[in-house]
Amino acid sequence: MTILLLVFSLWLPGLATSEAEMRTTKEELDVETAVCGSLREPFMFWLWQSMAGAANPARAANIKGAEQIQFKTRDGIVLGGYKLVAGNPKAYLLVAQGNAMLADQLIADLQTFRDRDWDIYIYDYRGYGTSHGKSRLAAIVDDYVEIVTYLNTLGYARRFLYGISMGGVILLNAVGNTKLYSRLVVDSSPARISDLGCPERYDPMTHLPNDGARMMIISGGRDSVVPPAQMEELVRVARSRGARIVQDPELAHPYQDSSTALHRRRQHEAATFLSQE
């Protein structure tokens, strides 16, 4: 499986974002309005979707406990994804993937978390794979507010979230500074995206909880997609608020580690943190 992730700095710096392109309160009634530039944002999501490729349900066909699932958003968009069913689930884990990934590309790898007796949920972002709609930052953030809220009605004792690269940006924006989750792992996500053309209100920094004890942040020393310098502010502030910080000099960007052993080390760090009472 080859998965390439683009750093947010590739967002066409030559296309300036004017205030007119930022969403007003009135415009926010349409969640699929572009907020990071009326040309830039649709183009970048098109590029990421192209890199992710087409959905391939066959990847999950022979995985124990794998079920195709759907979620309908309040604006009527149907999101497709997968659930890995645990025998006696003690928690759920919702995974938000990177910006050039599909749910079916990760489902086999996520079995290691299901084997801890957690039900695993992962959805294609709107506009990707088996999900409908237009891929837009604000809309995707809104989707994850709804998904987390829905999962929290299902009676799970513990509520875990894992955001990979862009997924960390999405989850922090959606629920970072709320009580809607038990624990959250943010893996290789930038501190800010406002310097790349998005409104400051979407900066992950602005959504860190005041009490960071429920959060872990992973930063890889060999990450060339979101280098440590782009995470430094997020790491520094989260640490000051009590978050668990893993700065591993041997890790690269998620799914780009140089060996299976390093990838498993990353997963072990995440699983160990999530498992703590």
Image (cartoon, grey):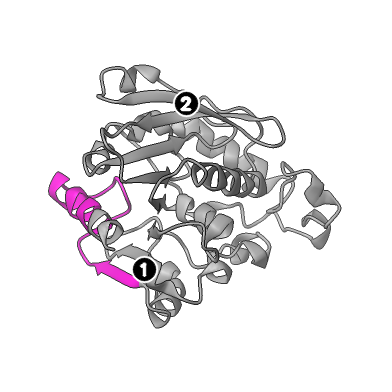
Q: 84 or 132, which lies in front?
A: 84
Task: Choose the circle earlier in sequence order: 1 or 2.
Answer: 2
Q: Position of residue 40 (x, y in %)?
A: 67, 47
The vertical placement of 101 against 59, above or below, is below
Q: Which residue is mark 1?
A: 228
Q: Is residue 229 visible?
A: no
Asked whether 264 or 271 is in front, the reply is: 271
Q: How many marks?
A: 2
Residue to which mark 2 is pinned: 69
From the top left corner, tell me how far across and down residue 173 is, in percent.
57, 58
Q: Quadrant of residue 30?
A: top right
Is residue 245 shown in magenta?
yes
Q: Name which residue lies at 51% across and 70% down.
A: 208
Q: Which residues are magenta?
A: 244-270
Q: In the rendered view, does 275 fall on the left or right side of 265? A: right
Give the residue displayed 25% in from the left and 24% down from the top. 64
Picture residue at 32% right of the left edge, 63% below the top: 218
Q: Residues within 10 Å of mark 1 (few under 14, many from 20)?
A: many
> Which dot, 1 or 2, sits closer to the camera?
2
